[in-house]
Amino acid sequence: MGKNNNITTDKNESIFDIKNISDPDIKVSELFFDFTEWYRGQYNISKSVLVLKSMSDYSLSAVSTWENGAKRDGLTIRLPLEHSLFEKVINEGKTYLSQLSDDFTGNFFEKKLLMNENTRSFVLQPLKCKDDVIGLIGFSSESSDIFNEEKQSLFEETSVKLAEVIREKLINF
């Protein structure tokens, strides 16, 4: 995936300023992995997950995960909606921040996808395209207080751009 060489951790530069996200050859998973690597440079990310919502039956599926540089792609893990924090975030369309992993209110599968035994904080960011939420991206960190309301605007701003590109790529797929 040689395209990752363009990633930088300059805090003044967005991943969207340095990547040609409209490149038709870039897959959704590559964008997710690049997005995660960029955030890792900003926030000490240890794990992330990309969840997309099916437009036909509104089910949720984990499609890619990243953990400390290890990438998993091509997943289609359909997530149960019972006790689902992911579904709540998608339905409400609002960012969910947690400073302590002990208060995780999601189900077993969501916890395994998002967290490890050392997770101290996490964020779930809905991927909004216009008024529609097409999925979410979740990041966790082994550091506490990494994610806060102050940084929430950056997550929201960049996730809107990511959602637009993902929707376009999935429609044109």
Image: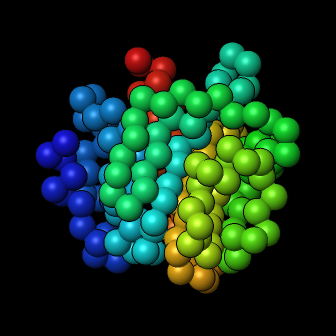
Spot occupied by residue 58 in the image (x, y as percentages of width and height): 73, 25
Q: In screen coordinates, is 52 left or right of 8?
A: right
Looking at the image, which is closer to me, 53 or 99? 99
| Residue depicted at x 36% and y 46% | 71
Relative to 53, does residue 107 appear above or below in the rendering? below
Image quadrant containing the C terminus:
top left
Instruction: Examine the rendered structure and indicate whether residue 129 appears above or below residue 4.
Output: above
* Residue appearing at x 76%, y 63% in the figure: 104
Q: Quadrant of residue 123?
A: bottom right
The structure residue drawn at horizontal position 69% and vertical position 60%, both measured from the top left corner, is 95
Q: Is residue 111 left or right of residue 15?
A: right
What colour scheme was applied to this rendering of the protein? rainbow
Query: Which residue sits at x=81%, y=58%?
Result: 105
Q: Is residue 85 left or right of residue 152?
A: right
For the N terminus, the image quarter is top left
Judged left or right of residue 82, residue 124 is left
Asked if residue 26 shows in the view, the reply is: yes
- Vertical side of 35 occupied by 45: above or below: below
**Visible residue check, residue 126:** no
Residue most toward the right?
Answer: 83
